[in-house]
Image (cartoon, grey):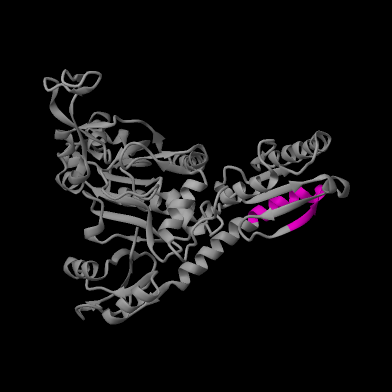
């Protein structure tokens, strides 16, 4: 498997980049700022997709697909949204190439094939979707309308990092329309809760739910709900957002419905999404200096079986036992890989599966056949034990549950030990430089103070936490009255 990873405490950023490549998750492509997601990495994304898709459909949402290209006139219809994304847009201006007469064998843009109207490669799909919703919604009978799209989007990033920030990335975006403000607000909160439950139960990532400040809201939203996670280097990562859009897009695209009373009114809207950035969160929350560590609920293979043999007779005998173990585990809905490749030695396979974070590894050799045992190794703790084959299935079921819970508990303990309350700006700066993590502090509620803190410390308000008691205090910067603490952090 080549040389080991850079240690996290030596260079966290380098460790992350090396791990993504060495674990065969993704790599930089020949397209500037874009990544190629490799099969092993994509299989994790597929598991994320499958579970979220199930949750969306259970709550009444349907999948649809909308075009990649958005006419500029539609994109600019909702002014705040257009302004918020304008500097990140890739724009299609021509529709044809032609042979370059000055450079034989090369092509150039056909200057006579200029589009009458530029097309924006979607950075988000509100504009096109709300223009479509205008045709789908006439009366209260058409509402609520709950649509989700699995798609790719493009935001022209200057500084990129695999999974965390790329010019093109994969995501889902939900878009809903409702008859009342109350119903739309409930929808936005529901989806944020679904994201939080998924992050904690499937990704084993503890998150803090809350609201974004006005300056951090999604462009065009009246309110943005979010889930914030803390990575092992003490930086925060926004893991998902859900937006209450009010009637802003309905008014921009003239989306009205006729109520039971015969009167017309604009619908109320939400949008919400998570992206392949979740892959980055997964890596940075659990992994270690030996490689990727995956929670069993999202691992492409929860168990890998590695045979150890010297000749074909031994391999045949071991394979028979291994195939039976694989069948028994699959009957319990446990995903298993029998690594019977004869092109690599067992030690190389052990290193690969450790690097790729397979939760449990079974090794079977000739002596194990004689004793009726196998060697079972946990990826999270690197503990090894010998287990009788007749008890193996029940032991693995128990171990997988233990690993899932242990990873969450470990991440939660780290997160909670890195939330620090401060009451002065001096202590704020000291904590930020020495400990990192979340800082809980009073803020006067103004954009000016928020911007001052950001410029001077690089820390931003990650969220105004939900379900926390009001607490009278004074802003750490201005000394003005504040009735609640907010969470600051440096972030990805």
Magenta residue check for 480: no
Quadrant in the rendering for residue 306:
top right
Q: Nearer the viewer, residue 464 or 45?
A: 45
Q: Nearer the viewer, residue 105 or 205?
A: 105
Q: Residue furthest front?
A: 103
Q: Nearer the viewer, residue 474 or 257?
A: 474
Residue 162 lies, with reference to residue 13, above or below; the image says above
**Which residues are the magenta region?**
385-401
Horizontal and vertical percent for residue 244?
Answer: 28, 50
Q: Residue at x 27, y 30 (%)?
A: 136
Horizontal and vertical percent for residue 263?
Answer: 19, 38
Q: Residue at x 31, y 30 (%)?
A: 66
Quadrant in the rendering for residue 137:
top left
* Residue 313 appears left or right of 3: right
Query: Is residue 355 visible to us here?
Result: yes
Q: Residue at x 22, y 22 (%)?
A: 107
* Residue 265 appears left or right of 174: left
Q: Nearer the viewer, residue 244 or 98?
A: 98
* Residue 70 appears left or right of 408: left
Horizontal and vertical percent for residue 282?
Answer: 48, 53
Quadrant in the rendering for residue 29:
top left
* Residue 325 appears left or right of 7: right
Query: Is residue 138 visible to us here?
Result: no
């Amino acid at each position: 498997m080549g040389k080991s990873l850079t240690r996290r405490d030596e260079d966290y950023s380098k460790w992350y980049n090396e791990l993504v490549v060495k674990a065969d998750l993704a790599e930089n492509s020949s397209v500037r700022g874009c990544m190629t997601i490799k099969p092993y990495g994509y299989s994790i994304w597929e598991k994320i997709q499958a579970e979220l898709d199930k949750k969306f459909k259970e709550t009444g949402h349907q999948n649809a697909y909308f075009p990649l290209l958005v006419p500029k006139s539609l994109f600019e219809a909702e002014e705040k949204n257009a302004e918020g994304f304008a500097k990140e847009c890739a724009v299609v201006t021509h529709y044809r190439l032609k042979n370059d007469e000055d450079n034989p064998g090369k092509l150039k843009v056909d200057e006579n094939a200029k589009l009458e109207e530029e097309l924006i490669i979607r950075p988000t799909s509100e504009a096109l979707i709300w223009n479509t919703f205008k045709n789908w919604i006439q009366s209260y009978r058409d509402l609520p309308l709950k649509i989700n799209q699995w798609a790719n989007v493009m935001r022209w990033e200057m500084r990129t990092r695999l999974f965390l920030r790329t010019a093109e990335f994969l995501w889902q975006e939900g878009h809903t329309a409702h008859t009342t403000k109350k119903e739309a607000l409930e929808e936005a909160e529901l989806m944020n809760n679904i994201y939080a439950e998924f992050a904690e139960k499937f990704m084993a990532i503890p998150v803090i739910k809350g609201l974004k400040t006005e300056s951090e809201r999604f462009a065009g939203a009246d309110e943005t709900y979010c889930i914030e996670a803390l990575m092992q280097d003490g930086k925060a990562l926004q893991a998902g957002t859900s937006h209450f859009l009010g009637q802003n897009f309905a008014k921009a695209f003239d989306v009205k419905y006729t109520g039971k009373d015969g009167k017309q009114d604009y619908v109320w809207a939400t949008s919400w999404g998570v992206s392949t950035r979740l892959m980055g969160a997964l890596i940075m929350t659990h992994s270690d200096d030996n490689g990727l560590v995956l929670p069993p609920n999202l691992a492409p293979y929860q168990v890998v079986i590695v045979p150890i043999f010297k000749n074909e007779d031994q391999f045949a005998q071991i394979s028979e036992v291994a195939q039976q173990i694989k069948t028994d585990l699959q009957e319990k809905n446990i995903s298993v890989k029998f690594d019977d490749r004869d092109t690599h030695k067992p030690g190389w396979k052990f290193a690969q599966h450790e690097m790729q974070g397979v939760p449990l590894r079974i090794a079977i050799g000739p002596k194990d056949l004689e004793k009726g045992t196998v060697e079972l190794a946990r990826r999270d703790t690197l503990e090894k034990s010998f287990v009788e084959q007749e008890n193996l299935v029940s032991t693995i079921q128990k171990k997988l549950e233990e690993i899932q819970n242990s990873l969450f508990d470990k991440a939660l303990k780290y997160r909670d030990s890195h939330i620090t309350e401060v009451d002065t700006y001096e202590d704020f700066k000291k904590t930020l430089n020495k400990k990192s993590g979340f800082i809980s502090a009073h803020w006067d509620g103004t954009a000016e103070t928020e911007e001052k803190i950001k410029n001077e410390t690089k820390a931003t308000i990650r969220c105004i936490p939900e379900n926390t008691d009001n607490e009278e205090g004074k802003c750490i910067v201005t000394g003005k009255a504040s009735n609640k603490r907010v969470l600051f952090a440096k972030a990805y």
